[in-house]
Amino acid sequence: MEKLIIKGPTPLKGEVSISGAKNAAVAILPAALLINGECKIENLPNISDVKLYCEILEKLGAKITWNTNNEITINTQNINCDADIIEITRKFRASYYLLGSLLGRCKKATVGVPGGCKLGARPIDLHIKGFEALGATTNVSQGNIYASAKKMKGTSIYLDFASVGATINIMLASVLAEGTTVIDNAAKEPHIVDVANFLNTMGADIRGAGTDMIKIHGVKELHGGSAYSVVPDQIEAGTFMLAAVASRGDIIIKNCIPEHLEPLTAKVVEIGAHVEENGDEVHVWCNKRPGKTVIKTSPYPGFPTDLQPQMGVVLATAEGTSIINEGIWESRFQYTAELNKMGANITDQGKSALFQGVPKLTGAPVCVSDLRAGAALIIAGVSAEGTTEVLNLEHIDRGYENIEEKFRKIGANIQRVAL
Ligand code: EPZ
């Protein structure tokens, strides 16, 4: 077990390069199961969720060669559809994508009820409804999800909520289905477009990803034989933009897609920081105390919920009183109690929180409750006066590649030490 020791305050300065997107990679890896052949996946983030997924795919019979820390060649010609992967699938949320891809490839799937960040109920009823509409029968018992189908048949599916997971899972389950599937009120996040682009590169016929109506024309087989590079991580890029603002720093974020960051850029400029976009770079600097604002998180292209805790750190030391309304998850303000230990003045009201800005934070021992809360507490530690100890790092390592090295490169005084 390890912890981070951070000494502050440090205005972060310099350049940081963004890795491949976690939420695309953890969907593209199971999508490879739909290929009856081999492909290469580049720009994979070197994070524990990716390692875990590769372990599962090998258990299912895939042959994986790591060409570099961020690139694999994967052969999924010989898949054992009956392999027991239940225990390992309980360890993280995105294992639910195995339901869609194994139903597509094997017409059957058994996974453990997925784990992952404790952000509220996190049901998968929309996924199940989609699989059943395509002709599958499902059953949840003894903490496992069982799904099977004689055949998968394309149909129209309307999503009651633009769920990221349900959109991708239904897409995976219908790529090899008979006929055409239409997903209406689909989610539009960049990682959904990336999964569709990956599958189309391998021989699928998916149209409209990135809009609220996706059409999947079923094909007989995915041939593979190509290489695909995972999209840069929108949320990691946004994390460093907010680190620049919170620390009153000046950072150039390289290898990102500015368009994916627009919902954040608008807010960062509104509170008085500066943003310049230049090709695949975003330059963010802030040389004064930010102003107050009101944030409401919502599906893309709304303000991303996965950047809400990092924005919370900025608003904790902003002028005046700000409000954040969390439109996606029931309980995503656990980090505010940790910031209050650092001298912040935040009132958690369940699905919203009130941020009465204080001039500065001071270092303290804090605990990470989930992945994005972890990133937020690192930003708080860098910006605070004194020493901050960050515990429960396993949450952070699930989704950020070499995070303390990247922060050190832009001037942070941060060390990972054994507990
Ligand atoms: C994805 O989770 C991301 N995870 C989450 O990122 C992210 O917070 C979320 O999308 C929203 O952007 C991955 O991509 C692996 P949803 P997912 O289905 O798919 C309700 C991170 O930090 N809902 O869009 O689980 C649900 O309860 C993680 O990287 C149902 O009611 O999110 C929630 O309120 C944390 N029934 C809302 O929809 C369903 O069947 C959004 O969920 C599915 C979802």
Image (cartoon, rainbow, N blue to C red):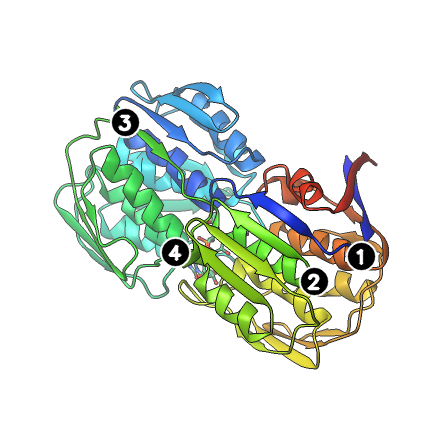
Residue picked out by circle 2: 248
> CA–CA distance between discs 1 and 4?
34 Å
> CA–CA distance between discs 3 and 1?
47 Å
Q: Residue at x 43, y 67 (%)?
A: 302
Report the mark closest to the observer, 4 or 2: 2
Q: Earlier in the sequence, mark 1 or mark 2?
A: 1
Residue 374 can be seen, yes or no: yes
> CA–CA distance between discs 4 and 2?
29 Å
Q: Amino acid at mark 1?
A: Pro
Residue picked out by circle 3: 226
Q: Earlier in the sequence, mark 2 or mark 3?
A: 3
Q: Considering depth in this image, is 211 or 161 the residue closer to the camera?
A: 211
Residue picked out by circle 4: 189
> CA–CA distance between discs 4 and 3?
24 Å
Q: Earlier in the sequence, mark 4 or mark 3?
A: 4
Q: Considering depth in this image, is 74 or 78 the residue closer to the camera?
A: 74
Classify 10 Å Cα crowding around label 3: few (below 14), some (14-19), many (20 and above). Answer: some
Q: Residue pushed farthest left?
A: 179
The quadrant in which residue 43 appears is top left
